[in-house]
Image (cartoon, grey):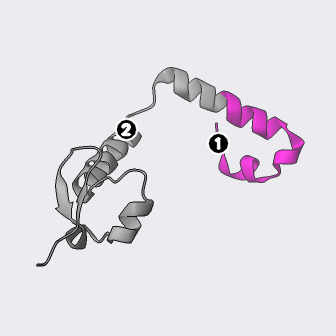
Amino acid sequence: MFVRFYIGCDRCDDWFHGSCVGVTKSEADRMDTYVCPICQQKESVVDADAASVPLQERHWLELRRVVTSLQVNTSSGSFFTMCCYV
């Protein structure tokens, strides 16, 4: 009798054949958690959406403060003088 190895996703609780998601039984035994390809894709879409949120005015002000501080610091070198126009 042939028994297939299954692995459960710790995010959505769906189960997958290990061979279908590229995980062997020995690899699964060493994992603390498993996130299926579908949940991984959903997480990367959420991360990409978060990265595309425009900065608010207070963020721009803080960024300007940090860059100005780096420009004043002599150890920051000429990189900031040439590349960071604020």
Residue 85 disc label: 1
83 in magenta: yes
Q: Residue at x 61, y 32 (%)?
A: 63
Residue 26 point in image, percent of width and height: 39, 70
Task: Please say whether residue 67 is one of the residues in the magenta stretch.
Answer: yes
Q: Tell me if residue 86 comes above or below residue 38 in the rendering.
A: above
Element type at marker 1? loop
Query: Which quarter of the rendered picture does the N terminus lie within?
Result: bottom left
Q: Residue at x 27, y 56 (%)?
A: 36
Q: Quadrant of residue 30?
A: bottom left
Q: Look at mark 2 in the image and give the residue it sits on.
A: 50
Q: Is residue 71 left or right of residue 54?
A: right
Nearer to the camera, 84 or 59: 59
Residue 7: x and y in percent read 25, 59
Q: What is the magenta segment's predominant secondary structure?
A: helix
Q: What is the magenta range? A: 65-86
- Amino acid type of the residue tagged 2 in the rendering: Ala
| Mark 1 residue type | Tyr
Left or right: 83 in relation to 44: right
The mark that comes first in sequence, 2 or 1, is 2
Q: Disc 2 and disc 1: Cα gap in Å?
A: 25 Å
In this view, the residue farthest toward the right is 74
- In this view, the mark in front (2 or 1): 2
